[in-house]
Amino acid sequence: MEKSAVLTLRPNPASFPVSVLPLAQPLLNQRDLLTQLKSSVLECSEFSQRSCEECLKNVSCLWCYTNNTCIDYPVRSILPPSSLCSLSNARWGVCWINFEALIIAIAVVAGLILVSIAVCCCYCCYCRRRSRSRSDEEEERLARKREERRLQSLQRKHERKLKHDEIRKKYGLLQDSDNPYSRFENE
């Protein structure tokens, strides 16, 4: 038996074209990449006393207009506490709308969505009930017509029987109703 040698190829970054090098870089050394990413992320406090736009480029930061500070967003609580910054002076995501207005806008949009869902559900339920009542009315109407046709058919059948009996009576073919089993006589 021959032993097969396992060949492992390690890419050489110098052999890659410049456009492929950024794609191959994470494959080469992931630890160096993570270290570079950690060092490139700045703390929110480093943006204090600068501008709101610079602070809010990082989504984990909150800008407070009262003292022009950039602070880490308190992710443990949904809303930032008033001891940190009042809602009317806090900005998150965009600088042109305060946190209070943002909360009100989100609540209004969510309320409109819920109301429209409720209206759609009620309308659908009403339409179903209405269509059921229409189908019940339609079914009743069809049953009445069916019964009318059955009665007309029975009436016509009775009229035909009477007419046939008259013809039988005229030609003497009508049997005695008292003795329907009479002997047939040949002449």
Image: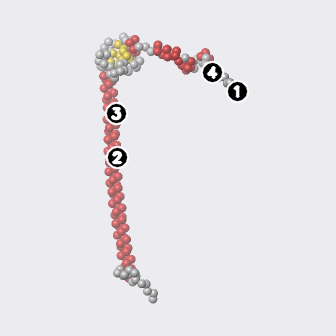
Please say if 18 is above or below 112.
above
Q: CA distance from mark 3 to mark 1?
A: 72 Å
Task: Kindly check if marks 3 and 1 are in contact, taking CB atoms under 8 A apart as contact.
Answer: no
Disc 4 target residue: 8
Quadrant including the N terminus: top right
The answer to which of 25 and 152 lies nearer the viewer is 25
* Residue 132 x/y as whole percent: 34, 50
Q: Reading the chain from its start, which is encountered first: label 4 or label 3? A: 4
Q: Reading the chain from its start, which is encountered first: label 2 or label 4? A: 4
Q: CA distance from mark 2 to mark 4?
A: 67 Å
The answer to which of 5 and 105 lies nearer the viewer is 5
Mark 2 falls on what kind of element?
helix
Locate residue 146: give its quadrant: bottom left
* Residue 47 x/y as whole percent: 39, 12
Which kind of residue does numbered mark 3 sit on?
Ile
Q: Taking the image as drawn, is residue 147 in sight?
A: yes
Please say if 181 is above or below 32.
below
Q: Which residue is found at the position 31% from the left and 23% from the top?
A: 101
Which callout, 3 or 1, points to the residue nearer the camera?
Answer: 1
* Residue 9 x/y as whole percent: 62, 20
Which kind of residue does numbered mark 1 sit on?
Met
Quadrant including the C terminus: bottom left
Which callout, 1 or 4, points to the residue nearer the camera?
Answer: 1
